[in-house]
Image: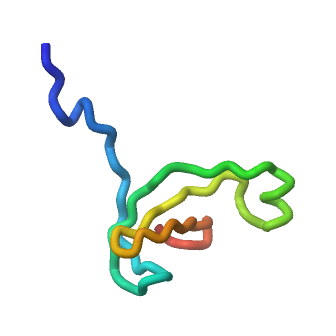
Amino acid sequence: MLKSIEEKQPQVNTCEQTCPTCHTQSVFTHLGQQTWPKAVAQSLNIPAIVDLWRCGNCETTITFTDEDTM
């Protein structure tokens, strides 16, 4: 039996935001998560796990913290 295309394709997580780099309303694609060692995250005052997002207009990769809205 053949699987449908939807079953074979991974679901892409996107959202629309204003890009802080190119200042356009863009669709951001979730690239995955970056994990920092606990000591590094604490020294930088960031979460140990951050989500990475890519701007569909300028391709800048950014992260959003809990304070940011995504």
Name the residue rendered at 47%, 71% in the picture. Answer: 60
Coloring basis for residues: rainbow
* Residue occupying the far top of the picture: 1
In the displayed structure image, the side of residue 16 where residue 42 appears, left or right: right
| Location of residue 56 (image quadrant) | bottom left
Instruction: Give the answer, above or below, for where 23 lies relative to 33.
Output: below
Name the residue rendered at 67%, 49% in the picture. Answer: 35
Residue 25 image offset from top left, x and y in percent: 34, 80
Instruction: Give the answer, above or below, for where 44 lies relative to 19.
Output: above
Name the residue rendered at 39%, 65% in the picture. Answer: 28
Instruction: Give the answer, above or below, for where 59 lies relative to 8.
Output: below
* Residue occupying the far bottom of the picture: 23
Quarter of the figure with the N terminus:
top left
Q: How many marks?
A: 0
From the viewer's side, name the closer residue of 69 and 11: 11
Name the residue rendered at 61%, 65% in the picture. Answer: 66
| Location of residue 27 (image quadrant) | bottom left
Residue 30 image offset from top left, x and y in percent: 44, 56
Residue 29 image offset from top left, x and y in percent: 39, 59
In the displayed structure image, the side of residue 56 where residue 37 appears, left or right: right
